[in-house]
């Protein structure tokens, strides 16, 4: 039987492309850093990357991007004086595995040379309880007596897209600990890697060569004997210990881990992972393919969940490298946040704290970006300060090599509303207003202020309109009345008003202080008016279709295939000034359908179906964010086969790694946490039919044909529930640790869920 808790491969070749894709698929991370799924002997040419969360750097005019640390996991081996690597030696066997339950990467490789067989095995993890720490077990054996040399330590050769970011690279060996330190180019932040080793064989000498700080261990190996050592490496930066010396901290960390030993470090790490899975796993009986793909997607989200107290968020390519500038997009709030909110609110809060932390950046952007904008205009591509990393010329044209003007940065204004909506969802589903008081309320009001400064009041029509924007479909820029954007803006006003009411009743002092602090008292009436009078395109009275933006219906109705057949270059960008999609109705990704999903309770199944049928054939799905929106809406109106197809497409995107890696001239290879979140949403909110608001949880299951039993966990208002859905019944178990009794609406039945009790409700499955 297939193990549904691991993925493995025997592949090791496939050139740079294969190495790059496996690096993504087999990556590990622990919120603090990512470690690509590369092999011990690999270097920058094989895209080894230890990408750090929350520390960025810029070199010259190149893109600002996250900093990659020197590789403390580096090891290479020689047999009888000749180096062995999967890249250059004869490999008789290779096997590598990613263990999802314990977040560990393992490889085993057998090299053959001169009638000898050399086996190396290594296993690594990035500690889940000590975020700065990585731990590796490495073993070597040879079937015949041999001279073996191991070089292990820290590789200071770093793969960067737009580096080098670490200057003044310096190496040291102190108290048996290897150190490599560099200083970032822009902000002079120190990044230090320390490495300690636990080894009881061979002669150790030291080497600092080619930017590598290494121990050289030589010995005469006996035939069939296995030699094992353990490596502990720690990455520490000025972000961790502002202003304080970082060397002693790093040295202490690795020596402490070494004293504790590999087994104890691993046990602590496993215990943390057991807790994560206990809560976040989703179980599907009857469909192993979906089970593994969904579990893998959840794994991808869990490994990049920000460290507690860091106020970091999750970049669009997670910690799989520097692609997309390591920036945080709307992907986080709209696609990843729901998973955390419904299963792991402790991490959801961290994501929101990041937006609070970067509010000043959003204010700066509003002040500088537009004609009289005020409030908070969040960065389209946000880094540690919240200033926008997105450039005005963000995509390289493969024909001319010149950069194309895109308006993602200045016109994709829905980002502020996406943030406000997520903040308000957090309050509604946790019932906890402390985040609002910590700065969340200020964010919401500043986002409303931004939209009010952006909106135009059309006197003749007696309404506000949001003009000159880009919706989620980035192929059509500078459009008026984009339904998604207008709806999100309007919702921001509705939320601002509801929040003010909540605070007025429950936290009047805090509200008064906030209103005074940001001088917003006279604008509150404007927000109430805008919530009423902001125009959102409505469904057509005959067809039910919502026009994506003014004039969309008049565009040329080419099919996606026709459009693609006209492409001259495989990577050409279909949007921007003269892109092929611009004069046509072909859209990049779910836009109106995304809106129907986000505001699903406000539109009927009929409207959803009409729009889905209209827009789906016109959607290129050129973004990994698209398929899940179509899947969820299809589940809403009952096309479960389609929903399933697009669920699988979304859930397998990183597992299969069959995505495009270039758009224009821009390298895009990396993981897709938004799709990972989209897979979870499609499963639990789509097929599970879970819909929670401030009043209650509603469950209207519509299981796809393949799934016999579907189990998941749901966090709500400080309590948690285990939900089991079969073809005919929903069982809700409330652990005795729950504090309150909750009333849920299950398949239309009011259901009491008391602490310690389990209740089963029968339902009639959706006809297919
Ligand atoms: C999509 C955006 C998304 C970004 C990062 C783009 O291709 O169009 O919606 O935010 O990728 O994932």
Image (cartoon, rainbow, N blue to C red):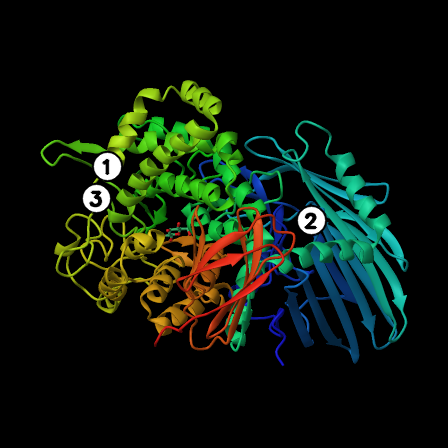
The image shows residue 445, relative to residue 490, as above or below, that is above
Q: Nearer the viewer's eye, disc 3 or disc 2?
A: 3
**Between 286 and 101, the one nearer to me in the picture:** 286
Residue 532 shows which numbered tag?
1
Disc 3: CA contacts within 10 A as few (<14), some (14-19) or many (>=20):
many
The residue under the point 76% across, 63% down is 77
Name the secondary structure under disc 2.
loop
Q: Which residue is mark 2?
A: 210
Q: What's the CA distance linking mark 3 and mark 1?
A: 16 Å
How far apart in space, not on screen, are marks 3 and 2 (Cα)? Answer: 57 Å
Q: Residues within 10 Å of mark 2 (few under 14, many from 20)?
A: few
Q: Residue at x 58, y 43 (%)?
A: 53
Q: Where residue 162 appears, x then y in whole percent?
A: 50, 44
Work out whether residue 376 can be spotted.
Answer: no
Find disc 3 in the rendering and name its residue: 481
Q: Is residue 152 left or right of residue 500?
A: right
């Amino acid at each position: 039987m297939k193990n549904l808790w691991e993925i493995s491969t025997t592949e090791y070749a496939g050139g740079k492309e294969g190495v790059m894709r496996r690096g993504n698929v087999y990556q590990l991370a622990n919120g603090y850093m990512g470690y690509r799924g590369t092999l011990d002997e690999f270097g920058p040419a094989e895209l080894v990357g230890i990408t750090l969360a929350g520390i960025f750097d810029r070199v010259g005019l190149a893109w600002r991007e996250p900093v990659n640390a020197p590789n403390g996991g580096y090891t290479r081996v020689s047999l009888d004086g000749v180096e062995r690597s999967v890249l250059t030696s004869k490999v008789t066997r290779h096997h590598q595995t990613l263990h999802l339950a314990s977040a560990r990467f393992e490889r085993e490789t057998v090299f053959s040379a001169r009638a000898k067989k050399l086996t190396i095995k290594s296993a690594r993890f990035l500690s889940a309880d000590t975020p700065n720490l990585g731990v590796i077990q490495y073993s070597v054996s040879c079937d015949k007596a041999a001279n073996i040399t191991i070089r292990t330590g820290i590789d200071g050769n770093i793969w960067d897209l737009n580096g080098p970011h670490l200057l003044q690279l310096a190496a040291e060996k102190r108290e048996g600990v290897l150190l490599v330190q560099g200083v970032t180019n822009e902000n002079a932040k120190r990044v230090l890697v320390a490495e300690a080793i636990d080894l009881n064989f061979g002669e150790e000498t030291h080497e600092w060569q080619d930017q590598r700080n290494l121990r050289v261990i030589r010995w005469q190996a006996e035939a069939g004997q296995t030699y094992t050592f353990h490596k502990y490496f720690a990455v520490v930066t000025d972000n961790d210990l502002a202003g304080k010396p970082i060397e002693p901290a790093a040295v202490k960390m690795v020596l402490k881990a070494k004293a504790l030993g590999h087994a104890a470090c691993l046990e602590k790490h496993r215990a943390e992972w057991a807790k994560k899975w206990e809560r976040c796993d989703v179980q599907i009986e009857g469909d192993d393919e979906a089970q593994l793909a969904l579990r893998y997607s959840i794994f991808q989200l869990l490994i990049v969940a920000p460290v507690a107290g860091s106020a970091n968020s999750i970049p669009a390519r997670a910690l799989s490298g520097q692609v997309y500038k390591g920036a945080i997009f709307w992907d986080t709030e709209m696609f990843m946040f729901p998973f955390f909110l419904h299963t792991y609110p402790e991490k959801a809060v961290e994501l929101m704290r990041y937006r609070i932390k970067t509010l000043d950046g959003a204010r700066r952007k509003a002040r500088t970006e537009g004609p009289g904008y005020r409030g908070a205009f969040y960065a389209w591509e946000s880094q540690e300060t919240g200033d926008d990393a997105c450039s005005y010329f963000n995509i390289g044209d493969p024909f001319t090599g010149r950069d194309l003007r895109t308006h993602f940065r200045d016109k994709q204004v829905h980002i502020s509303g996406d943030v406000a909506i997520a903040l308000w969802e957090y309050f509604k589903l946790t019932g906890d207003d402390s985040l609002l008081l910590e700065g969340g309320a200020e964010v919401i009001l500043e986002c409303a202020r931004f939209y009010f400064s952006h909106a135009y009041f059309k006197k003749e029509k007696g309404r506000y309109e949001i003009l000159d924007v880009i919706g989620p479909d980035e192929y059509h820029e500078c459009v008026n009345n984009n339904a998604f954007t207008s709806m999100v803006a309007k919702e921001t006003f509705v939320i601002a008003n509801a929040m003010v009411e909540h605070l007025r009743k429950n936290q009047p002092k805090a509200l008064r202080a906030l209103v005074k602090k940001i001088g917003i008292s006279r604008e509150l009436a404007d927000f109430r008016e805008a919530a009423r009078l902001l125009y959102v395109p409505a469904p057509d009275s005959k067809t039910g279709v919502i026009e994506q933006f003014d004039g969309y219906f008049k565009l040329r109705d080419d099919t996606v295939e026709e459009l693609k057949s006209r492409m001259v270059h495989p990577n050409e960008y279909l949007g921007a000034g003269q892109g092929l999609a611009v004069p046509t109705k072909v859209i990049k990704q779910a836009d109106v359908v995304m809106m129907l999903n986000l505001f699903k309770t406000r539109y009927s199944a009929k409207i959803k179906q009409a729009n889905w049928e209209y827009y789906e054939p016109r959607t290129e799905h050129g973004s990994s964010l698209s398929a899940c929106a179509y899947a969820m809406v299809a589940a809403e109106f009952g096309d479960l086969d389609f929903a399933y197809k697009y669920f699988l497409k979304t859930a397998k995107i990183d597992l299969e790694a069959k995505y495009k890696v270039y758009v224009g001239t821009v390298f895009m290879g990396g993981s897709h946490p938004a799709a990972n979140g989209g897979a979870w949403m499609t499963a639990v909110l789509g097929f599970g039919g879970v819909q929670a608001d401030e009043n209650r949880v509603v469950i209207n299951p519509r299981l796809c044909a393949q799934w016999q039993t579907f189990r998941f966990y749901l966090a709500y208002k400080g309590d948690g529930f285990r939900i089991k859905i079969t073809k005919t019944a929903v069982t809700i178990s409330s652990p005795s640790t729950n504090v309150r009794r909750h009333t849920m609406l299950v398949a239309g039945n009011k259901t009491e869920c008391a602490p310690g009790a389990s209740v089963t409700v029968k339902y009639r499955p959706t006809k297919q």
